Amino acid sequence: MAAEGNGEANTDQRERALVDYSPTRSRRAVLLYIVDNLLSAVVVGPLAVFYWRGTWELLNVYLFPGDQAASGWTCSAIGNVGLVCLVYLQEPLARWLRLDNKLHWMFGYHLYTYVMGALNVCHWRGVWVLLDHYTGISVLSSWLTFAIGKAITSYYSYVTLLCDHFLQIQTKFQSQIYIV
């Protein structure tokens, strides 16, 4: 029995060692850590900015370009309703999209990511345009919105925990709503 338990412990240690990417483990881990951070800063970060700016500018051009209030309200509604719908569809989509199926991964994950990204841009653009429209653009407006945003994000920062599946978003009360 002791030998079996010891064998299980060695297996657990090997599995943990395979997923430990700590930069203090080896030179290879340090190199991977540096390359990962460089790619994030030099490639992924700018590409995310390009996506946001391109989507934002397309909305500026095509979504009520002459009416700031209508554009802001429409954008905010599309973003918020769409994001809420995606949250409610997470469980059914997670059951349907299998991470071990390459086709599901390629199309499902990427389509979900693009739609989620576009809806996030819509949401933020709507809020931004409405703030500019109703409060104006001034130093006082900037500081007030910064202070309010900082207070809210500080309060909710503990909610950002990792989940088991990319279609799960952590909620404050750890609740899930099932559709279907």
Image (tube, grey):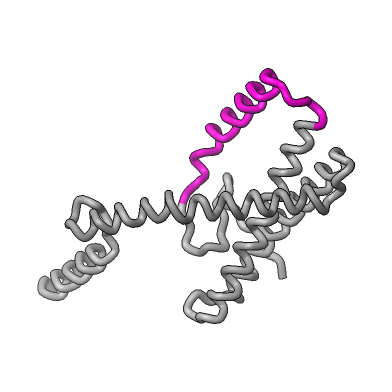
Which quadrant would residue 21 be assigned to in this image? bottom left
Q: Residue at x 60, y 73 (%)?
A: 108
Span of residues in magenta: 133-161
Residue 11 placed where, x, y %?
Answer: 20, 71
Q: Residue at x 35, y 56 (%)?
A: 36
Which quadrant would residue 112 be assigned to in this image? bottom right
Which image quarter is the N terminus in? Answer: bottom left
Which image quarter is the C terminus in? Answer: bottom right
| Front position in the image: 119 or 82 | 119
Instruction: Mark yes or no: residue 177 visible.
Output: no
Identify whether 54 is placed above or below 108: above
Residue 102 placed where, x, y %?
Answer: 51, 80
Find out whether residue 157 is within the magenta segment: yes
Q: Residue at x 43, y 49 (%)?
A: 41
Q: Is residue 23 toward the left or the right of residue 48 in the image? A: left
Which quadrant would residue 69 be assigned to in this image? top right
Q: Residue at x 68, y 50 (%)?
A: 121
